[in-house]
Image: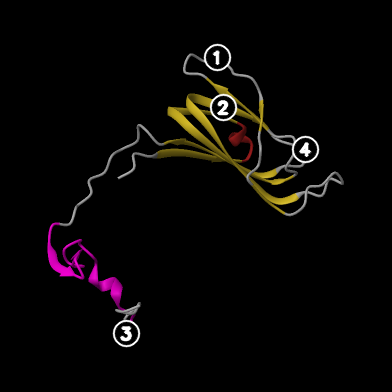
Amino acid sequence: MPRTRAKSVTGAAARTVQAEFPVEHVGVSWTGPKRGASIRLIGQDGSRGAWTALQPVCGAGADEDAGDPAKSVSVLVPAGGAAGYELRLPDGATDVRSTAIDTVNGPSGQVATATATVGRIADVEYITRAGWGADESLRFKADGTENSPQAY
């Protein structure tokens, strides 16, 4: 199971964040102009890196030279184990949210693995639903009919 943990903040608090864990990625979203945002990572020793322009990967709506704001903008930035970050957002940015993500040192989970196989069909071995621990109660709707067909 993935070893992931995160710290999400919104509004003004989203602009400078110190995490309690090494930050591997930073997710940033806002409403407003796509251009003019930047991030500066804070090292584990407290040093501040250079400001780097954010390159939005998702912007719904236009943001041409005329200045038409996007409806929403999101960016994912690799942070390489930073202690935190600072954000500069364009004038008019609202609904700011940032998330520090640790994909390396988070809690680990136990995952049960299937051991019961039924056999082979056309030389393909398969595992029964019971064998992989399926929750059979999820197969049926409230009226007793199946949620999905048995054959495709």
Where residue 29 appears, as percent x and y from the top left, is 62, 44
Answer above or below: position of 75 versus 68. above
User: In the structure shown, which secondary structural element does the residue marked by tag 3 occupy?
Assistant: loop
What amino acid is at disc 4? Asp
Mark 3 vs mark 4, foreground winner is: 3
- Residue position for label 1: 47
Disc 2 from disc 4: Cα separation: 19 Å
- Residue position for label 4: 91
Earlier residue among tags 3 and 4: 4
- Find the magenta span and give its range: 115-144
Residue furthest right as drawn: 66
Disc 4 from disc 1: Cα separation: 26 Å
Q: Is residue 53 left or right of residue 2?
A: right
Where residue 85 appears, as percent x and y from the top left, is 56, 27
Residue at 56% x, 24% y is: 41
Residue nearer the viewer, 13 or 73: 73
User: In the structure shown, which secondary structural element does the residue marked by tag 1 occupy?
Assistant: loop
Mark 3 vs mark 2, foreground winner is: 3
User: In the structure shown, which secondary structural element does the residue marked by tag 2 occupy?
Assistant: strand
Badge 4: residue crowd in 10 Å (few <14, some 14–19, many ≥20): few
Where residue 90 appears, as percent x and y from the top left, is 74, 36
- Residue position for label 3: 145
Residue at 22% x, 45% y is: 110
Rendered image: mark on residue 5: none
Earlier residue among tags 3 and 1: 1
In the image, is residue 104 part of the stretch drawn in magenta?
A: no
Disc 3 from disc 2: Cα separation: 51 Å
Q: Is residue 30 left or right of residue 104?
A: right
Rendered image: mark on residue 85: 2
